[in-house]
Image (cartoon, rainbow, N blue to C red):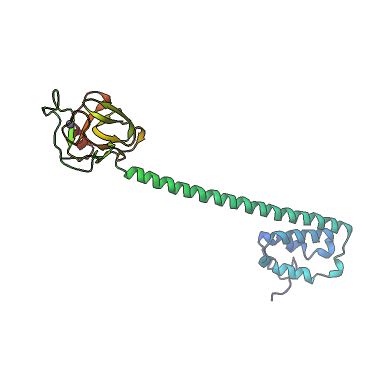
Amino acid sequence: PRPVRRSGGSRGRRRTPAKRSALLTVAVPSACVMGVAGIAAASVGGLGASAGETKDDTTNLAAADPASVKPVAANSKIDTQLAALSADARDFGDRASRTQERLDLKARQEAEKKKRDDEAKRREAMRPKFVLPVNREGLSAYYGQAGVNWMSVHTGIDFPVSYGTEVMAATDGTVRTQYNSAYGNMAIVTAADGTETWYCHLSSTRIRSGSVKAGDVIAYSGNSGNSTGPHLHFEVRPGGGSAIDPLPWLRSHGLDPT
Ligand SMILES: [Zn+2]
């Protein structure tokens, strides 16, 4: 145990107290002189400092002559004020704690949302934006071929798939369906850049309107219209205009059905 040392001690080696105890160092030994003010100062100081830091000073306070600490009317008033102050501090602490909990919850929710958004972005980035219209490679007819079924030349490519094969949107876009005596049941997907992809001779359609993503099954292949057997006739029409050869277009998007 350290010896009880009063301020202005005779050692000459003045302790340079940390700022936390400056108030107590002055106030406590002077309690008998300062009376109310000293006690109040000591009490207030005690509120702010942690238990470990005030230990020595508390000992000092206990060592002060109890007789000199006289309860006076002013004291109880200050006690009341201090109690209110203390209650305010607790209340503030409670509110701060609840605020912190709300902030923590908000931060967690935001972090979780960001995680979900990032995952969705990752999936969106990974998702193929161009897809072959059927899960089958090999063609039975090419673009530009002359043939009995075509008035001039072939305006698309034919996939030799059996009746009822799933037909997928080649691009993201908006789908619509119609019937044409030559093309039979057909679905048309219009991409954001205006490119139309046509899916013809269908047996039935699955998605007749609205937004689709590349790879969505929009219809089933068939033999409707001017067709001599089940297959999928596929066309590409930039800007909804004339049909181009779908093969270079597909290859430019990393796809090769041959
Ligand atoms: Zn065809």
Lateral position of residue 63 relative to residue 94, left or right: right
| Front one among 126 and 163 | 163
| Front one among 69 and 19 | 69
> Which residue occupies 64% across, 52% down?
96
Q: Quadrant of the C terminus?
A: top left
**Quadrant in the rendering for residue 55:** bottom right
> Which residue occupies 27% across, 30% down?
186
**Extreme right residue here?**
73
Lateral position of residue 154 relative to residue 98, left or right: left
| Front one among 150 and 191 | 150
> Which residue occupies 57% across, 49% down?
103
Lateral position of residue 24 relative to residue 189, left or right: right
| Front one among 165 and 75 | 165
Ligand 1 visible in quadrant: top left
Q: Quadrant of the N terminus?
A: bottom right
**Extreme bottom residue here?**
1
Q: Position of residue 235 (x, y in %)?
A: 22, 30
Q: Position of residue 87 (x, y in %)?
A: 74, 55
